Image: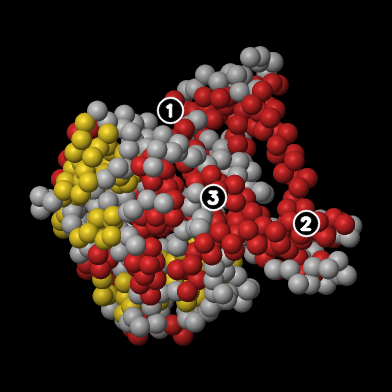
Amino acid sequence: MGGGHAGVEAALAAVRVGAMAVLVTAEPSAIAVMPCNPAIGGVAKGCLVREIDALGGVMGLAADHASLQFRMLNLSKGPAVWGPRVQADAGGYPGIVRRALVSAGVSIVEGMARSLSGGAGRFAAVELEDGRSIPGDAFVLATGTYLGGVLFRGSERWPGGRAGGVSSVGLDRFLSGSFHVERFKTGTSPRVVTRTVRTDALEVQDSHTIPFRFSIESGSPVSNRMKCHLARTNAETGRAILENLDRSPLYGRRIGGKGPRYCPSYETKVVKFPDRHEHPVHIEPLSPDSRLSYLNGLSTSMPQDVQYRVLRTIKGLENVEIALFGYAVEYSRLAWGEFDMSLRLAGTENLFAAGQLLGTSGYEEAAALGLLAGANAARTAMDKDCVVPDREESYLGVMVSDLVRKGIDEPYRLFSSRAENRLHLRQDNAHVRLGKLARELGVLRGRRLSLLEDHLKQYERAHELIRSAGLEYLCRRPEAVPSDVMRTDSGMGGLNPECVESAFNDIKYEGYIARHTRRRKAAIEHWALPVPPGFREAGISIEARQAIEASMPGTIREASDLPGVRASDLEVLTIMALRNGCST
């Protein structure tokens, strides 16, 4: 149920596992659209896209073919935290995904789900608003922001999951009667007419020509076909917000849902950071065939006249024309405790959920969760056990663990800092790391399975050649790069450079990864220690301090389950407890 990034990956994963899949959506023409900025990847998110591809998903392949511009974020840092990101063709990307659905044999039904029928925790059919009933052995909810969705702009308020979309009211009522449901909020930026932007007055956002592809199935690297530009707000821009703050639905208390901390509206930036006037605004083209650009970083739900005033204070946008105004959307999501690590809903045998219904934000997070939910739903329909990802081996595992064990109080966004084992969870070795999970889920078939097997063989061969040639020292040099070992007489000239890169980086970081394993083992041994009374002065993160103050956990183990508490925070608390002479 749902045709967004979670829904399509769920349907495709179910088919790859061996089931028949039906995708129900109110808008077949809007399958896999990008209602916010048309980009795929980023720090941690780019790694997640490669993990999706390692599990046979379509997102990476579609992003490769729809690429308009490529950037590898964090290039000034080590390869463990590099973040591949493509600016995608918002018009071409959905078409690639739809063709994948048709090719896989997914049946697409136009309609709006109203409820599910069945008894004793096992559902038997989806009931649609028009009275039709679709039977099934397992079900996946991937409703995005449409579940009880309400849009806001100034004093305007209307139902919908995005502009032009239809709110799922009946299904929201059904789920609210069976599960604990809460409200979240997100928003989007204006789309402007590109020709009205003075790009000559703006900073060009440089592309990176690194040969990169998200998908193991792509025959060539991503392309750089279009330029992006960077503008910046100023004091006058902020003043336009402050003088009209009473007209904001967010600050006028017309929106009750909690918004994302790490992707706030521009109104929130102005209020929370009054001394900071310059905020970056990325001007990103929607498509080579589109006359519009997206203003990434300027999410707003202010009235239309205020949006015009705000934009026209920015250098390069003095005469800009707005084609689609920004807005906020409030929607329902399942509360903590209503689903388990397999993404199955509590008290049910065959109902799963994914994407924003679980409290996440972002295309990449939704797609990864959809893939897992779809695979486990298919396995349930085929009387097979569900499979759960390992936190130590994937960002997917980190995300699922965070959502289920810790819970969230705001829309969840994936960061590399959330992963304790992030030196191992890199984008370059995603296919190596996820091979075991892919086999357990049963999501790889045919050509994709053959490609993965060949990739793993070449990786293992590269690893062997580096060690047999005694080149470990070269891998560990800070200035060394993978091509350095390929230029030696080690016999690696004919191997896939991506496999050599993975082996090179695994050896580069193996000492740190081994240290992490030892620290994790030691941390587990100290989980029963009490949280030290002086934790406020312990040097932990602001999020961790706030979470501990709100819940007052008794032990380090209990603190580890709180949202916002990271591995580094737990280490500080453990050291402080030991220094204070605490014992288990």
Query: Element at badge 1?
Result: helix
**Can I make out residue 85 in this image?**
yes
CB atoms at circles 1 and 3 under 8 Å apart? no
Q: Is residue 344 left or right of residue 330?
A: right
Amino acid marked by disc 1: Ala
Q: Earlier in the sequence, mark 2 or mark 3?
A: 3
Q: Residue at x 51, y 55 (%)?
A: 444
Q: Position of residue 291 (x, y in %)?
A: 32, 82
Point out which mark residue 387 bears.
Answer: none
Residue 217 percent coordinates (x, y): 54, 68
Q: What's the coloring here?
A: secondary structure
When the figure is inspected, residue 111 is found, relative to residue 404, above or below; the finding is below
Q: Which mark is residue 438?
A: 3
Residue under the point 26% across and 75% down: 323
Q: Position of residue 122 (x, y in %)?
A: 27, 34
Cα distance, mark 1 to mark 3? Answer: 39 Å
Quadrant hosting residue 274? bottom left
Residue drawn 31% across the image and 72% down it: 191
Assign a secondary structure to mark 2: helix
**Earlier along the polypeptide chain: callout 1 or callout 3?**
3
- Comparing 239 with 204, the one in front is 204
Q: Report the disc number at residue 550.
A: 1
Using a 10 Å C-alpha cutoff, classify the residue at mark 1 as few (fewer than 14 neighbours), some (14 to 19) or many (20 or more).
Answer: few
Labelled disc at residue 463: 2
